[in-house]
Image (tube, helix red, strand yellow):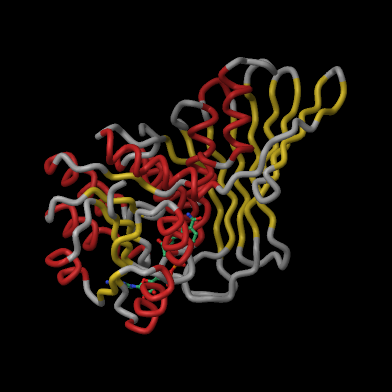
Amino acid sequence: MISVGLVGVGGWGKNHARVLYELGALGAICDTDRARADTYARKYGAKAYYDIESMISSANIQAVHICTPTKTHAEISKRLLEAGLDVFIEKPLADSVAKGKEIADFAAEKRRIVAVGYIERFNPSVMYLKELLQHQKLGSLLLAEFHRENRWNGIKDVGILLDTAVHDIDTARYIFAEEPIQVFARTGKVMGNYEDFAVIMLGFKDHRTAIITTNWVTPRKERKLTAVFTEGVVRIDFIQQEVRIDNALGSTIPYMETKEPLMLEINHFLDCVQKRSKPAVDAYDALKTSIIAEAASYSSAKGLPISLNV
Ligand SMILES: NC(=O)c1ccc[n+]([C@@H]2O[C@H](COP(=O)([O-])OP(=O)(O)OC[C@H]3O[C@@H](n4cnc5c(N)ncnc54)[C@H](O)[C@@H]3O)[C@@H](O)[C@H]2O)c1
């Protein structure tokens, strides 16, 4: 098993720490918040660092997970790639398309592996849907309607398009298995410095469409997808990992074993590092999601649909 470092052990990074520990791969924890680094390093028997330079120079690691705020992803990942390490970057790739492209190009130049944390690809319910699609069990996919809503009063360093909608943009690209040719979005803000509610319409060819509705206002956490096929409808609850299929024969809820998507995702990254293989979501793939999110922002600002050539 390889040894991995973790940069950023905050709200989400602490889940990476636990999973890496459970997989026997956690070698180092780095956080500028010393108390946090110490707490989790002690908890999981890893070495604590307070800046990436000291981790690079003294930890014996082959890869690093980056779970720091989005605005820091580009600088931290480029430094780690420069040091010859493979990286797992939490979504989104970066806070702009330009910085995301820098990461992708730099990793290609350095021949390092970059995986980006679009975790829904590892949600068993999405994996089930993808299988239905691949075997064309319900005909072809026409419409996908996503809801990703919950109350968020905290401070974020980017708005809901880059922070939250990107999950569903990625899943829409994944299930349609092609890139959208058009985006139209409306966004607004009621609480923070950035947009905190959005509706995005992604147009795929032949009028097939994804609608992404997301906000940080709804008090109850909801993460759902309704996929309309020519011969049935699939409803997914991402949180419950439940799939319901309605077609001419009636309704079925297939049995699915619940699995932790983060565990599957991290296992996949470690496997790619060991085998030197391409991750399910690499930097150039994640860059396409960033391009679409940035175009959605532009569409909302201009009040116009935007043509895409991703
Ligand atoms: N895949 C998912 O479902 C998911 C869920 C939540 C967050 N995320 C992503 O994870 C990332 C982190 O989000 P979060 O909510 O955990 O943020 P957070 O603010 O809770 O934690 C960030 C941590 O990084 C540390 N940090 C900041 N700059 C640092 C630096 N230069 N070096 C070392 N440590 C540094 C902070 O001290 C903090 O402990 C974001 O990119 C976010 O989009 C992904």
x and y percentages locating residue 81 in the rendered image:
17, 52
Q: Closer to the camera, 194 or 110?
A: 110
Q: Which image quarter: residue 291? A: top left
Relative to 184, does residue 72 appear above or below in the rendering?
below
Quadrant holding the C terminus = top left
x and y percentages locating residue 248 in the rendered image:
85, 18
Q: Closer to the camera, 175 or 303?
A: 175
Relative to 275, does residue 296 appear above or below in the rendering?
below
Q: Which image quarter: residue 201? A: top right
* Residue drawn at (20%, 68%) of the image: 55
Q: Which image quarter: residue 36? A: bottom left
Q: Which quarter holds ligand 1?
A: bottom left
Residue that protrudes farthest toward the bottom in the picture: 35
Left or right, 139 with reference to 106: right
Left or right, 56 with reference to 229: left
* Residue drawn at (59%, 24%) of the image: 131
Q: How many marks do you count on the picture? A: 0
Q: Closer to the camera, 8 or 298?
A: 8
Left or right, 145 with reference to 184: right
x and y percentages locating residue 270 in the rendered image:
34, 44
x and y percentages locating residue 7 in the rendered image:
31, 65
Left or right, 250 with reference to 276: right
* Residue drawn at (53%, 32%) of the image: 203
